[in-house]
Amino acid sequence: MEQQHERTGGLSYHGSSPDLGSPPISSCERGESSHQEEDPIMRRNEIYLPVPGEDKNLDGDFREKDGNNESMPMKTLYARDGSLLHAQLGPYFSDGQRRVDYVLTYSIHKPSGVRRQSSKFDDATFFQRLRRSMSTRSSRAPLQPKEDPEIVATDQQANFHEDDKRFKREEFEQNLLDMGLELEKDERTKISGLGFLKIHAPWTVLCREAEMMKLKMPTTKLYEVKQGTNIVEKIRLFIHKVTDPLHPKVGPTRLEDVKSLSLPFSREKQHLFDLSDRDLFFDSKTRSSIVYEVLKRIRWTRPNYSMGITSLLANGVYTSAFPLHDGDVEGDGGKPNDRQLLFEEWASYSVFYKYQPIGLIRKYFGEKVGLYFAWLGVYTQMLIPAAIVGVIVFLYGCATVDDNIPSMEICDPRNNITMCPLCDQVCSYWKLVTACGTARASHLFDNPATVFFSVFMALWAVLFMEHWKRRQMRLNYIWDLTDYGMEEEDHNRAEYELRVAEKTMRQDQGAPKDEKPKLTCTDRMPAYLTTVLMMAFMIAVTFAIAFGVILYRISIKAALHISSYPVARSNIRATVKTTAAIINLIVIIILDEIYAYIARWLTLKEVPKTDKSFEERLIFKTFILKFVNAFTPIVYLAFFRGRLVGRPGKYLYVVGTYRMEECAHAGCLMELCIQLCITMLGKQLIQNNLFEIGIPKLKKLLRKRKSELTSKQEEELNKTLKRYEKDHFLGPFVGINPEYMEMIIQFGMVTLFVASFPLAPLFALLNNIIEIRLDAKKFVTELRRPIAAKAKDIGIWYNLLRGLSKVAVIVNAFVIAFTSDFVPRLVYQYMYSPDGSLHGFVNHSLSYFEVKDFELGTAPIQPHHLGYTVDVCRYKDYREPPGSITPYALSKEFWAILAVRLAFVIIFQNLVMLMSDFVDWLIPDIPKDISLQIHREKLLMLDHFMKEEQGKKLPVRDNYNHDNYTSPSLDNGSPSQPRSRPKFQARAGW
Amino acid sequence: MEQQHERTGGLSYHGSSPDLGSPPISSCERGESSHQEEDPIMRRNEIYLPVPGEDKNLDGDFREKDGNNESMPMKTLYARDGSLLHAQLGPYFSDGQRRVDYVLTYSIHKPSGVRRQSSKFDDATFFQRLRRSMSTRSSRAPLQPKEDPEIVATDQQANFHEDDKRFKREEFEQNLLDMGLELEKDERTKISGLGFLKIHAPWTVLCREAEMMKLKMPTTKLYEVKQGTNIVEKIRLFIHKVTDPLHPKVGPTRLEDVKSLSLPFSREKQHLFDLSDRDLFFDSKTRSSIVYEVLKRIRWTRPNYSMGITSLLANGVYTSAFPLHDGDVEGDGGKPNDRQLLFEEWASYSVFYKYQPIGLIRKYFGEKVGLYFAWLGVYTQMLIPAAIVGVIVFLYGCATVDDNIPSMEICDPRNNITMCPLCDQVCSYWKLVTACGTARASHLFDNPATVFFSVFMALWAVLFMEHWKRRQMRLNYIWDLTDYGMEEEDHNRAEYELRVAEKTMRQDQGAPKDEKPKLTCTDRMPAYLTTVLMMAFMIAVTFAIAFGVILYRISIKAALHISSYPVARSNIRATVKTTAAIINLIVIIILDEIYAYIARWLTLKEVPKTDKSFEERLIFKTFILKFVNAFTPIVYLAFFRGRLVGRPGKYLYVVGTYRMEECAHAGCLMELCIQLCITMLGKQLIQNNLFEIGIPKLKKLLRKRKSELTSKQEEELNKTLKRYEKDHFLGPFVGINPEYMEMIIQFGMVTLFVASFPLAPLFALLNNIIEIRLDAKKFVTELRRPIAAKAKDIGIWYNLLRGLSKVAVIVNAFVIAFTSDFVPRLVYQYMYSPDGSLHGFVNHSLSYFEVKDFELGTAPIQPHHLGYTVDVCRYKDYREPPGSITPYALSKEFWAILAVRLAFVIIFQNLVMLMSDFVDWLIPDIPKDISLQIHREKLLMLDHFMKEEQGKKLPVRDNYNHDNYTSPSLDNGSPSQPRSRPKFQARAGW
């Protein structure tokens, strides 16, 4: 028996392994008793197919044997010459013919042999644990850890649980068979302790489900895609030719001029579709999503309780569910499969400059993943102009740094300006000329071009949205999603059902029966309270840490001022800024990971009803936490630093005697810039390299060490592993929301504070070029294939993007008005300057302070540090001079400049919003050619139906005495030539 | 022959009248030659129905005669006892059976008899002219005026044109017949010179088109509409019971608990629908829209040219096209038809307090009109709370007027403040106490409650939008529009096609043939230029007129100041304000009408491609012009009046020596309020009463006088008029866009300046209560029935509403910050007041002016008018006193207050926008119960299909040896019981 198994390669054994104890459920006994004697292949047919006729005659995949079993020996022959081995290693049933469309795995415990085969059992639990530890990240497996105690419980209980699970499995599988699916089990895999249930959907099931899901399939009717006038067409072709090396080498190289009309698949209109090769009509993605659709519908049912596939997975009846990859990523010389194509032309750093093969991605992973990569592509593409303009703005700053009057004045030693000390006692007076370097550096990021760049980026954000909307519409058209309506309602989550069941049990006596049980707000109140409190706590933690970093900065600065090393003193500012920024960065990265876990935990506590709701709540929480985390230090630097300082003689103190930090002379923009730069670069480098490349590698290494195989052995094993075994070793697919989240935070960095850091788009661009290929590699090689999810748009992320770009307008307005010196300079130039230039601006922006007004104990210890006695020092503020009626009160200039700052905010915000709305209105959401195409498709469809109508009418006219207002039965029943011809063609095809 | 015609009532005559000259086109000769000898009814069948079998056997409406003609006498019998007369006067063919679903009219000239029957001819042209003059307002008839010269041209040419038209008509009608429609002509109506082509769609055509249009029809499958939990349900029922008298008495009085599942109609699934009464299955609205759909598709075609129904109408081949009303508005005792129900329960002022019967409106007029009235209803309903809060705010102002410290200070004669003169020379100094009345009045509209009310109204606007979105969604669900996708593409407009044809003719030689001719931007450039120039000119005109009114105000005020009548002088302000406001109002109303015509003319010049594009362009232009027109004087009053004044000694002059107007002491809010009040009240009263009630009455009167019939005769005539003749006398339906426009401008009034006029919502509410019934009356009694247009939303109007409510936030922020004294008072109270109260505010807000600083010739002629010598006068501004370093320069207080004003704008705008977005996000767009229902419907549908699937499978299982992957022919062809039963039922039904 073992021998035969080896030769034919994992043939199906029904139920548990032979050394299993007596089967407890009678409904399975028939299968159990018969399986020992018969040929495995024949047995499968008889047990798993209650309607054998359908299997043999109706299933298109089996047309070779067509009613007789004579072809069977030929197949085994075929098996012996080695090709079958290939087929078996591929995603096929053991007959090498029927595709495995879906795989369910389950753990098999061998209770009777636990003691004897303890090593084997350990092996099994190892894999189980491994899988479990990996799947805690998955959204589907959050209840599994609950079972951990059960594993270490007594054998007795384990036996009972295992039997219960097996029983549920068997019933569930019976339901699958009733739906027409075909199953094959493999419990003798390389991975002991794990059984695989392979599911194949025969042609009839595919057709039926495709019709019910209203899947749009391409018909044989082609039509020419005309792209506008001749000139436009020529330009398009030219552009396509020029950019040819940028296009990935997948599929047809030249532009497609014809598109086949797509129609919702319907068996009654089968003649419209090209069914010449049924194996290719539904691609592997479609097949697996059809099977998944069936799986979702089928339930294991008891009078008071029923479990869908998600509940079964959550309860450990099955351990995982996934469709199979098309094959290995390394090609074997033949025609490469889609996965290989993707690996070569997409998931590789060497093709970083190329467009992405979005069509193929969609074909392989489904619309949702396709849309993510399309969006990422559009975003990256749109970053190119932004990065170029950003670099130009930066270079403009560099070029004009020597012409900048304020920094020239600061650097001019003739302007002998004595500044007030920056801290109490230990610091002394200082000369403004020492701030020369900072002032010059600040100009790089604080010049009129920055204002232009802010406006530019606000419009860029709108253009990006519009461009994406159009791209999305175009993809919708190409992918035949234009008619795809609202998303299908989700099925309830397993956790939700469990909670509802618990609730029903509790109030079984009292409650009226007519209401469908559900979780009310009251049930969820504790969870909501926890959420609110935890979120508030987490945000408080973020603020506290940011405040801690501020204190660190203040104290270190004071300490360094005391230190006697002159080198340390000269580098004080740079050192403090950089270390603080790095501390901030590390805190951000650590908290990011913690917050992700907390958000998930909180969402699980809330027990959302559907997966969609779960996703939305999770995204909402994660977004708030991560956003606050990433932007708290930046917002502090931009808007609060240097504003809550007080004035000489009346400083503001925090935590006892710490004076709040002041900005360097030329505004806080410089420090904001450093913080942004370090956060962006560091976050992306560390998160990408460490988390996305490093940790998976580490995990692999660990796994390898545990399995204690040499690399040679491993390679050998790898070759003989079957497709579903290989896929089982891959990480589970956890959705693309983390990827989106990362990009949204980056988008925030790029747009929110772009006024202070024009190089942000460049950094983002460089990161994204890597990010695309990194994600691609992950999806193609490291993760199990996801279920193809349909999606028409990127959903909630679009709203977040919109929200961010709206907030960005206001934030940038405030940054320019308040953080930069743009407005004061402007006001000086036009209201106070004697000659209309900026000469004298520095002097005008500094107020006077008489040193005798220092509070007791705050005056510097070394007042003669500069070599002369200081009577009056200067500080950056607009206040009345000491001799006026109200000394040190805010001056008229302060109010005038404040008014202009505020006016600037209003004008900037409303102007940019108006421009954005105008651009939004100007660019149609649907590209013109696409709307024309859709229109033409509709006309073609109408035309087609009209023709069919007339085709129907003609034969009817001959026998018009018939009662024809029940026409359907009539016109289909009549042997009319046009209807029956396609049938003939379809048959002649093979 | 004539006798028989009279008895059977307008039987159909094919082609032109008997005294027509020789028919010029041979294709018509067959019809012409045969029609003289035969019975008219029989003839119709033979000529108009090329497939007689279809007519007799396939048309469900003719089941009585079922293959033999014996039933015919019975029908004429039925005719003789008078009921036929009723049927003939109703919307039926002359047989009293077949419904007239659509009517086309055309003019019949009798060229051979022109000289003899000149009086008759005059009659005809009179009606034609009347119709034409009326239809210039219609969007379909803009090309008709071009023909006017042709009417007065020679007979010869007229003959040729008429023949050409008749020929086109005949070919077009032949095409209609080919599509299966049934026609009947009536050229001997009471209205001589006019022929009626009545169109009836038989059952087969209805079914075919319904299937192609994917019309959703109710199936027999009912399901229970469950409305949440028991408590919710009880509350709902209770509310329904309480509000019962408010519900119109149409249809079922109690709430509907069941809804029938709707499915796109399909002849193959006929058994699902309730076809027991085929006459009622498609209601009259659906029937006419089906016919219109067919009409739109059919074209009169020549090799290089083709004309659709719109082109034929535009070219005068047909003069009008309309569906028929269900009957007269006055009931005759029997079961009232829908029109009567609408007239009694909706289009009557006596039911103003009731809900509108939206379902019935939709059933009768279609979704587009239904949505308009639903929207108007929601708007009116939402105005109730706004009006109540507005009145409360106003009453609060009234109640606190005596506690208001600033006005108390102004009215206190002890504060002996001398103010600077309001105009040069003729005006003198005045005492502030004389402004007491204005100050007290101003408080009514300028108090802290106003700020609250602005915020309230901003949120109200968002709530209104959200409420409407939900209501719209609910209506979409009830009306089965949830799956209704994008609007169907419009057919090209006739004018566009004409222009394209002209263009093609011009470049016939040069241009390549492969491109579809179309109008490019270059073709439209002159029109675009005209549009831009005209729009700019019109806006300039509006500004000029507004400026004119300002000049009027200034000069009259100066003149009145000179006048020696003390009464005139005391009433100066009130008189000037009121007359200026009335002038503004009159100008607005006149320009409104002019602008509507200009916008239409400009849009016609642009030759838009489709009706949709035409509508959008027209709305865009009209909206801009009307909006600018309505709001220019208000914006001036709110933001510019009193701001561009200059200061004493340095006033700002316009047009030579006119000093710009100042505001009364307590801000301009009062004047803004008067202007708003007069504009709103006057505009609505005049436009409603004069234009919507008066002018139609006048038109009717004129028409009556022309027709020279006494009212008795008219009544008599009215009784014998057939349905289509009556409808012909009604005004054509011109769309609901003017109604929307009126409401949008009103919405602007209500939201934009609500800070200055809290009674606006009340005025709007009162107006709308009348408006609803007025519009209803117009639609039910005065206009032809519109083609039922499908619509899922209110389209562009929603965007305009959104835009307006966004602008409203900013405008209100500015009104509160700058027009009202709210911010200065606040700043005084918290920054300058010695005791934290408003005492001393008036003194603080007035600057000092030394009279010796008056410019030459501007000092008052009578400086001693007040009885004492004035050295220093006061004026309302924040400027330095005369003795300071910079006399009369803007003071620190000015800048401080300006900064606070601007800060208020920023905070108000962003806070309200944030709150709006939050409310928007909080309230789901789709009501929960509706989304649940939609979900349940989908499940039911799926369930239903699954059952059908299993029903199919069972018989298949018996003969599974069949080749069943071409299942459609198999499962329809097999005599399976479940499929054939409905057919039987349908037959048994009658």
Image: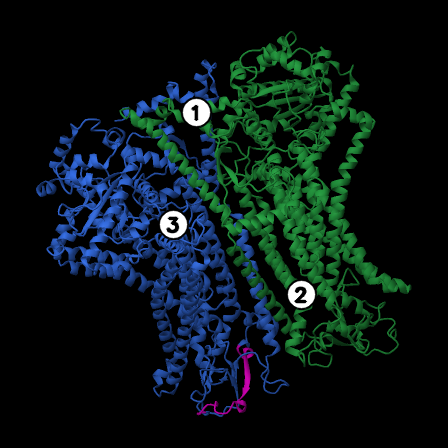
Chain colours: A green, B blue
Is B602 rendered above or below residue A745?
Answer: below
Q: Quadrant of residue A3?
A: top right
Image depth: mark 2 or mark 1 in front: 1
Dot 3, crowdedness within 10 Å: few (<14), some or many (≥20)? some
Q: CA distance from mark 2 to mark 1?
A: 71 Å
User: Hey, what amino acid is under mark 1?
Assistant: Arg
Residue situated furthest left in the rendering? B3
Answer left or right for B446 relative to A853: left
Let me know if residue B857 is in the magenta part.
yes
Quarter of the figure with the N terminus of chain A: top right
Answer left or right for B253 relative to A551: left
Image depth: mark 2 or mark 3 in front: 3
Disc 1 sits on a residue from what chain? A
Place of residue A740 in the rendered image (x, y in percent of width and height, measured from the top left): 64, 44
Disc 3 sits on a residue from what chain? B
Dot 2, crowdedness within 10 Å: few (<14), some or many (≥20)? some
Q: Is residue B327 visible?
A: no
State which region is magenta: B842-862
**Residue holding disc 2:** A449
User: Hey, what amino acid is under mark 2?
Assistant: Ala
**Residue holding disc 1:** A981
In front here: B38 or B59? B38
Is A277 rendered above or below residue B797?
Answer: above
Q: Which mark is residue B492?
A: 3
